[in-house]
Image (cartoon, helix red, strand yellow):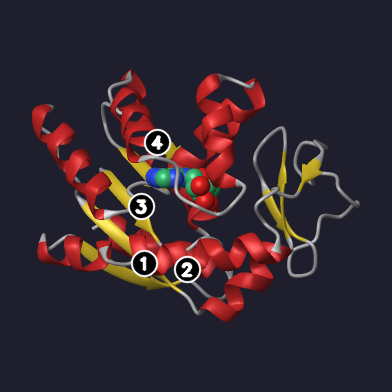
Amino acid sequence: MRLILLGPPGAGKGTQAKMLMGALDIPQISTGDILRAAIKENSELGQEAKKFMDQGQLVSDDIVIGLIKERIKEKDCENGFILDGFPRNIHQAEKLGETLKQMNQDIDLVIDFKIDNDELVDRLKGRCTCRECGAMFHLTARPPKQDKICDHCQGELYQRQDDNEETIVKRLEVYEKETAPLRGFYKNEGKLESIKAIGDVQEIFSSLCKLVVK
Ligand code: AMP
């Protein structure tokens, strides 16, 4: 199963992708995570990407397309993958389509996470992630049992640098302008389904499973 999770920042794609990964036994591929890892390593690519990420802008298509082309050719992607945060615009979607075609593969399903922008700002401002296992919490809605400590592995929780109000607003604008048109793109290809991304995480996961495991 080759899946794309489509939805604005904070819609819960990462959380649901991690849950699906366990259920389907295929990897989650998050371009945001790959870029943050490159920043942590202080590689040239990371330094270049950081300039855009700190401003809530998209990193250049050449960089992310290159990363994805390499990643989906890896062995663990043989039976499929869950793309989270890629593609982010029509050009990326076209390049992904071309690459998959060369590999005799195709995207099976694109799931659009539906949620209002008002909800997103609060979600992103309070979001925190474990440095060790990637588990996600929210300072008020889903707080960890101990301050800044992961419930699952005791790792340190951190807030992303781009989860501040100014950058969040920019990211949401960029989403509407660049990424939202992908709904039409994949609808035309007959691949688009949607789920309501508000409410209990487990309930959202069961709606997702109903679409994915048919
Ligand atoms: P995310 O973790 O998906 O919210 O992405 C964080 C940031 O990484 C975005 O605001 C962009 O600056 C950058 N980024 C992630 N994925 C892409 C992509 N497919 N195309 C361009 N920039 C991306």
Q: What residue type is labelled 2?
A: Glu
Of circles 2 and 3, the one toward us is: 2
Q: Position of residue 138 (x, y in %)?
A: 73, 61
Q: Indicate which disc, 4 or 3, sits on the residue closer to the N terminus.
A: 4
> Crowding at label 2, few (<14), some or many (≥20) Cα neighbours within 10 Å?
some
Q: Does the residue labelled 3 lie within 8 Å of ligand 1?
A: yes
Depth check, front residue: 115 or 27? 115
Name the residue located 39 percent from the left edge and 40 percent from the top edge.
60
Report whether residue 19 is seen: no
Q: What residue type is labelled 1?
A: Lys
Q: Is residue 105 left or right of residue 9?
A: left
Alpha carbon of mark 4 to alpha carbon of mark 1: how far?
Answer: 33 Å
Depth check, front residue: 1 or 117? 117
Q: Indicate which disc, 1 or 3, sits on the residue closer to the N terminus.
A: 3
Q: Which mark is residue 88?
A: 3
Which residue matches tag 2? 173
Which residue matches tag 1? 177
> Crowding at label 1, few (<14), some or many (≥20) Cα neighbours within 10 Å?
few
Alpha carbon of mark 2 to alpha carbon of mark 1: how far?
Answer: 6 Å
